[in-house]
Amino acid sequence: MNALFIRTAEEKDIPQLYELMLGYIVDFYQKPKPNEADLKKLIQHLISHPDTGVQFVAEKEGELVGFATLYFTFSTLQVKRAATLNDLFVTTEARGHKAGERLFEACLAYIRENDFAYMTWETAKDNLIAQGLYNKMGGKISEWLVYEIE
């Protein structure tokens, strides 16, 4: 049995994490390819400034097969830090092997161990696979509406 390890991202992960995030952005979400330097700078920022957020990676046989990104903010109502699970992605080949669950659990453990008020996240209305995972993990659809503007 090949072990799957979940851990925080490190400097050595930048090349593989860049490729994973590129697949997430371009292939999965069909968004334009970001500037390579900008995306690597974002990864480096999270590694160098863990007070702003943290990335977890799923590693199997020395290869990264998934990642999750938490960004930090604050909850005025609870007077504590809060986290947004902005990304959770697992390669097609690694799906069905609990990598998504394990990444989610790592994020949840992190916010609980560090006394965060809560963790929020969003998923596309048509992403039924992700919704199934989030429901299985105990997530609840928020009473709050999400707005955005560009």
Image (tube, rainbow, N blue to C red):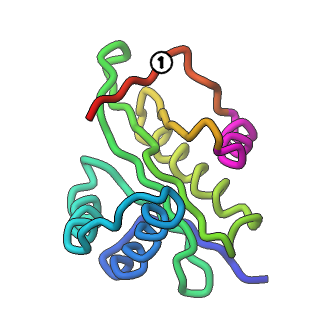
Q: Is residue 113 magenta?
A: no
Residue 117 spot, x, y in % from top left = 43, 27
| Local crowd size for mark 1, using a 10 Å CA cut-off: few (<14), some (14–19), many (≥20) | few
Q: Nearer the viewer, residue 55 or 25?
A: 25
Q: Is residue 9 left or right of residue 28?
A: left
Residue 55 spot, x, y in % from top left = 40, 59
Quadrant holding the N terminus: bottom right
User: Judging from the image, what secondary structure is the residue with disc 1 in?
Assistant: loop
Q: Is residue 110 left or right of residue 80?
A: right
**In the picture shown, does residue 88 fall above or below 13?**
above
Residue at 29% over, 29% down: 149
Residue 48 spot, x, y in % from top left = 21, 63
What is the residue that sits farthest to the right in this orientation? 1
Residue linked to disc 1 = 145
Q: Is residue 134 magenta?
A: yes
Residue at 49% over, 56% down: 29
Residue at 46% over, 72% down: 20
Q: Nearer the viewer, residue 73 or 5?
A: 73
**In the picture shown, does residue 83 fall above or below 66?**
above
Residue at 53% over, 54% down: 88
Judged by its main secondary structure, the magenta piece is helix
Residue 97 spot, x, y in % from top left = 75, 67
Q: Is residue 129 left or right of residue 106?
A: right
Looking at the rendering, the stretch of residues picked out in magenta corresponds to 127-138
**In the picture shown, does residue 80 fall above or below 101?**
above
Q: Amino acid at mark 1?
A: Leu
